[in-house]
Image: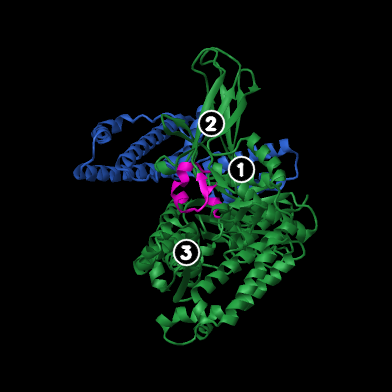
Amino acid sequence: MFGLPRALAVDAAELQRKFYVLAREHHPDFHQAAPPDERARVEATSAIVNAAYRTLRDPIARVDYLVRLEEGRETKEGATDRPKGPPALLQEMFEIQEALAEAKTGALDDAARATLVEQREGLRARMAEEEARLAGPLSARWDAAAPAERPAVLAVLKEALATRAYLRTVIGDLNEVLGEETSVAHHRH
Amino acid sequence: MSRIIGIDLGTTNSLVAYVDEATGLPRVIPDAEGRPLLPSVVAFTPDGIVVGEAARRQLARRPADTVYSVKRLMGRGFDDVKDDARYLPFRILPGEGLVKLAVGGREVTPPEVSAAVLKALKERAERHFGEAIEKAVVTVPAYFNDAQRQATKDAGRIAGLDVVRIVNEPTAASLAYGLHRLSAGVIAVYDLGGGTFDVSILRVKDGVFEVLATNGDTHLGGDDFDRVLALWLLEDIAARHHAELDRDCVDLARDPEAMQELRLAAEAAKIRLSSEERTTLTLPFAGFTYRREITRAELERLVEPLVARTLGPCRRALADAGLTAADIDEVVLVGGSTRVPLVRRRVQALFGKPPHSQLNPDEVVALGAAVQAYILAGGITNMLLLDVTPLSLGIESLGGIGNVLIARNTTIPTSAREMFTTSVDGQTLVDLHVLQGERELAKDCRSLGRFELRIDPMPAGMPKIEVTFLIDANGILQVQAKEQRSGKAASIEVKPTYGLSEAEVERMIEDSFTYAEADVETRMLIEARNEADTVLVHAERALKQGAQLVDADERAAIEAAVAALRAARAGDDRDRIREATTAVNRATEHLAELLMDAALKGALGSRRATEILGER
């Protein structure tokens, strides 16, 4: 749609320029005089253009989309399943989950709260690290990979995505327990 | 394409504007007297509905039948507005669903009241152009939810206007500024109106106005400033005049007329304090006159917590846009409440740069609405507005937003698809409960409505119903459903939680003919009578308070003028009423001056009131 190559590295300025061109072409504002069914079609196309831009401008959403494309799954925004923890993380997460379960049933004392806040900071740093890895070296590795190497890189990308999604969910749970607003759940990745 | 007007349907005032084809610039259409603002006040009188200045003037006299700030009630349920209801002098009926008001001996909904305002603006535009106007762009606060937007659209339909687009107020303002004054860059629009607060962060580039994030509070505005000041004054009156109050067994808080006088005086004092450091407030009550000086610092101490409440949404909008205050190139102020110096100081401190306010903050939203109307009519092709949906949308699961289908700050139009099936054999009805809001902010998360999908009976789990949720360019949800095995579109019955059904809107359109707004002649007569009533109240009060200040001849002259006005008011001759009103004003002029002198003497020494007033 945007006339860009299927690669994880995207020229942001070029993407925005093309988005503005497409947005103009398909925006309902410029089709007010059209008959109702055509207006509905324009509205639907406009929604697709917006969704495509939203996906492509975000390095993590790009990886997510690529994985789905490569696997031939139906594209769908937002994962509905609760992400499962990657095996490497399970051990260290056990403690946090335990504390979470406890906090959910009873009141939170100051010491327990402080521990949870500290753990959340650790997880946030870890998530940022994972995101940097996905957007940086892992994306570059995919773009450079020969067709034969791609399945292996794809597996690495998938694992990194799963780790990030899991961290995000746990951080979300922590936020809920701590009774603070999340800026993570809806943040632009 | 027929003409489309731009309307700013405000909490306190409303305006209508259009783009002048000759200059390409937007202009506000004034009323016959040259006033651009139409007070958003609707009075339900025995003679008919009165809108605007005439209705505003009788706020203190007919508080129970005169509706103001109805925008705060649009698309809301009784529980949402309980706090407001305590202070509003008209009756709000408890009940399920959309709130209803009991005024003028009938029940009305907020969209019907807003429709009266829209109709007055429509007529104003029709007089200006000499042609029928049927289409309008109407602005709403960016943080309005689906129900509030839908209520605004319904109001348009009841008024006989096809609302071709709902535009967010801060975005509209950016369009008005964008015509000439904005260079490319990232701008923050801070919009504090009479009842609502919005903040939007936009990127302007190549004629595209792309909203990056928006946030706000649909229950915070200048009305709240007036309220805290009025309550503070009430306490002060009670402390200083308890002797008189006790003697006359008066409880001002339970006297709606006195409370309206107090609110209006507080509003006027607040406005004066934006340009002056101190102001004197004089309020005549039965039995005593309350007078005190208020300084800007005192007002600021009272409204500080309210101003502080606007800063959280600003920070959240910045975070959602992935920006910091340093990334903002320009800050634009919109809404009458941004005239308050404290608001300006806080905004400047937050964003670290002086804000723009070259365009009149009362008019800029209407001007922007006119620009958007002109874009839709095909008059402008190089500007495009890309707005976002302010709140996340999801389907209820286990009592909360389980699954966010569309995240807040997503560019609209936007759509999401979701598959559903049945859990019981032969099930023909699937009930979806759609919620809007943020999971982390439970108070903002509210029911939008129920969508009942009807399908042919099949064994459990067999149907594959694909439901498409589309948020259109108005920020309003449209739902479509298709059963994939049969390819048949499922019929959908929409049950809005805080809205009007299709049938109710139809009935109100019918009603609007039955309860037609008083025609121009009648309206002018009502206005003249209202004016007469106000003058009569003042004259009688003056006679009661200052009878000893004038001689018998003068007293007799005033009494004669009052009697003549009473007689004229009973008749239908508008000009006679007006003449008699002027006569009473003339007759009481001297007495009023003496009363004012007497009132000011205590605090200000023996200088004449006229000298003091002349200094301002």
Which residue is labeled 2 in the image?
Answer: B450
User: What residue is shown at x 53% (from left), y 44% (from top)?
Assistant: B145
Q: Residues within 10 Å of mark 2 (few under 14, many from 20)?
A: some
Asked whether B177 or B381 is in front, the reply is: B177
Q: Distance between the residues labelled 3 and 2?
A: 43 Å
Chain where mark 3 sits: B
Q: Distance between the residues labelled 2 and 1?
A: 37 Å
Q: The blue chain is which one?
A: A
Residue B162 pos. (x, y %)? 70, 46
Extent of the magenta region: B68-92
Q: In this view, does A103 lie to the left or right of B493?
A: left
Which residue is labeled 1 in the image?
Answer: A2
Does dot 1 land on a helix, a strand or a loop?
Answer: loop
Which residue is labeled 3 in the image?
Answer: B262
Q: Which color is chain B depicted in?
A: green
Chain where mark 2 sits: B
Q: In this view, does B248 lie above or below B157?
A: below
Q: How far apart are marks 1 and 3 (CA)?
A: 61 Å
Does dot 2 land on a helix, a strand or a loop?
Answer: strand
User: What residue is shown at x 62% (from left), y 42% (from top)?
Assistant: A3
Q: In this view, does B447 lie above or below B553?
A: above
**Residue at the extreme left:** A111
Tell me, yes or no, whether dots 2 and 1 are on the same chain.
Answer: no
Sequence-earlier tag: 3 or 2 = 3
Q: Is residue A90 above or below residue B471?
A: above
Quarter-of-image position of residue B577: bottom right
